[in-house]
Image: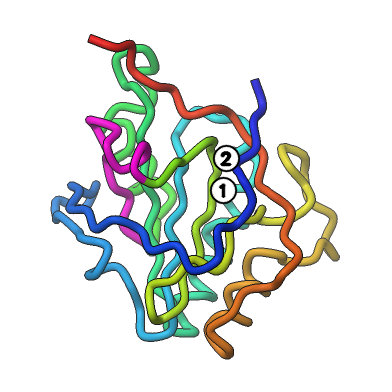
Amino acid sequence: MAVSPPICDFGWRAPEFRLPATDGRTYSLTEIAGPKGCLVMFICNHCPYVIAVLDRIQRDACDLQELGIGVAAICSNDATAYPQDGFDKMVDLARDRAFSFPYLHDKDQNVARAWNAACTPDFFGFNSAGELQYRGRLDASGRNPAPPDAPRELFEAMRQISKTGRGPKDQIPSMGCSIKWKEPA
């Protein structure tokens, strides 16, 4: 079922974390952040919305990293119920797609809960002071192929944040599959 995250809570500061990545390292939010800001994306391996935009996510991540924006992706899905989102499969995807950013595993889902992540993909764009400035979509395509001239909403918002410290006032929320939460113990 498709869901959308809430609108941007401008100025919100994300709780710090330390999560293992598919490259064998462990990263904190502080280590991910770049001098001009930070983009954290909640994604997963099996979501059709993520699969449809993964090439554009990779393109925008590379372009944002060149602007001094740190980028990371987090998978928080329940890997027991959705084995294609397990850590080994995350390693395969990151390697096969040559991710330029760390792909982190939130096995206990604490980061997704603390951040109020809602769907995959869910984008959190921060300025250099660590204040949330973007909680919108990648672009207008959803899970469809994007036309060649589709505006790069996420990229343009993050570029604005890198220059001014402020995100656009008008943002359209992302849409995707819900985070696959674990059953309560």
State whether residue 181 is above or below residue 104.
above
Q: Is residue 172 above or below residue 66?
A: above
Q: What x and y, as percent, mark residue 148?
A: 82, 61
Q: Which residue is mark 2?
A: 50
Mark 2 and mark 1: span between their CA atoms?
6 Å
Mark 2 surroundings within 10 Å by alpha-carbon count, few (fewer than 14), some (14 through 19), many (20 or more): many
Q: Point out residue 37 in the picture as x, y percentages from the top left corner.
A: 43, 77
The chosen color scheme is rainbow
Q: Which residues are magenta?
A: 101-114
Which quarter of the rendering shows the N terminus? Answer: top right
The picture places residue 131, in percent across and down from the top left corner, at: 44, 71
Q: Residue at x 27, y 37 (%)?
A: 110
Which residue lies at the image location 29% right of the left edge and 56% below the top edge?
Answer: 15
| Badge 2 vs badge 1, beta-carbon distance below 8 Å | yes
The residue tagged with tag 1: helix, strand or loop?
helix
Q: Which residue is mark 1?
A: 54
Q: Where residue 158 is drawn, which disc sits there?
A: none
Q: Quadrant of the C terminus?
A: top left
As rendered, which of 125 and 79 lies closer to the eye? 125
Residue type, mark 1 in image: Leu
